[in-house]
Image (tube, rainbow, N blue to C red):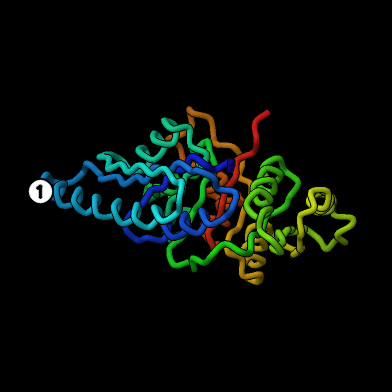
Amino acid sequence: MSRFNKIVLAVDGTGVCTKTVHNLLELPCFVRPEITILHAVSPQITSDQMHLYQERGKEILAQSQQALALKPDVTITTELVEGDPKVVVLEKAEEMNADLIVMGSRSRSRLEAILQNSVSQYVFQVAKCAMLLVKDGVPIRPIERVMVAIDGSPAARSALEAGIELIRDLPDRPILLARVQSQETPIAEDKPLSKAISYVRRLGIPYKTAVAVGDAGPGICQLASDQHVDLLVMGSPDRRPNYARSLPDLDRLLGKSTSDYVRVNIESPVLMVRPVQD
């Protein structure tokens, strides 16, 4: 059974998240997944608008369910909920003890996302579980080239384990280990990368490496583009404490977070994995 078998799929009618999940479910590691397809209707509309939005929401849910029901042994539940989308998504993920949240992310800057009360920005910062983000306009392809960002952190180790799980039963499909160095260093002397290589070798996982020098966020995005990856997997630090949930994350506001830079700028779907708690 996959570590991501309980999935909350937030849909808005664009279809990109549903298509991404459809491709994800083609991977052999997904066995009897449980998917809740969720569409939220904001309560801040008139009663006449509410009826129209609810009818449209039912159509969106039906289309997403039909697209995913083609795969056997998938348990699908649909929910049309009235409420703030970011709150609704988090509450549903908590309720079902979700392993993964899948949602779209609009193409805008970190500051714009915070000031405009971005749903994906908020959920990304607060969610306990992993999150698969699909930005507007990125190509959605079958998942064949999976890249994992390596930096030696506990979160990156969790990302590597997740990436291995996704591709390990796929023949002749190497995992791509991506490393952005602060200065050019031979692979054998780069401890995080050499350690990751040793780990995948012990497991008998085929691999390739891609190395860049510079800032981590731009470097990861460039490597993903150069390698034409279908899915990037990277670690994301654990969420902020509960008391800070309503506050802007200053690291992200100031652009210091690698994971947030990648979320905004990556040109492929990105799976953000939380570090495993001891």
| Quadrant location, the N terminus | top right
According to the picture, the residue beneath numbered tag 1 turns out to be 48
* Rendering quarter of residue 66: bottom left
Could you tell me which residue is drawn at 51 percent across and 53 percent down? 25
Looking at the picture, tell me which residue is in the foreground, 40 or 266. Answer: 40
At mark 1, the secondary structure is helix
> Is 55 situated left or right of 167 in this image?
left
The residue at 49%/53% (across/down) is 133
10 Å crowding of disc 1: few (<14), some (14-19), many (20+): few
Q: Position of residue 50 (x, y in %)?
A: 16, 46
Q: Position of residue 140 (x, y in %)?
A: 49, 65
- Asked whether, in this view, residue 225 is left or right of residue 206, the answer is left
| Residue 18 coordinates in the image, percent (x, y) | 41, 56
Rendered-image quadrant of the C terminus: top right
The kind of residue tagged 1 is: Asp
Q: Residue at x 60, y 40 (%)?
A: 274
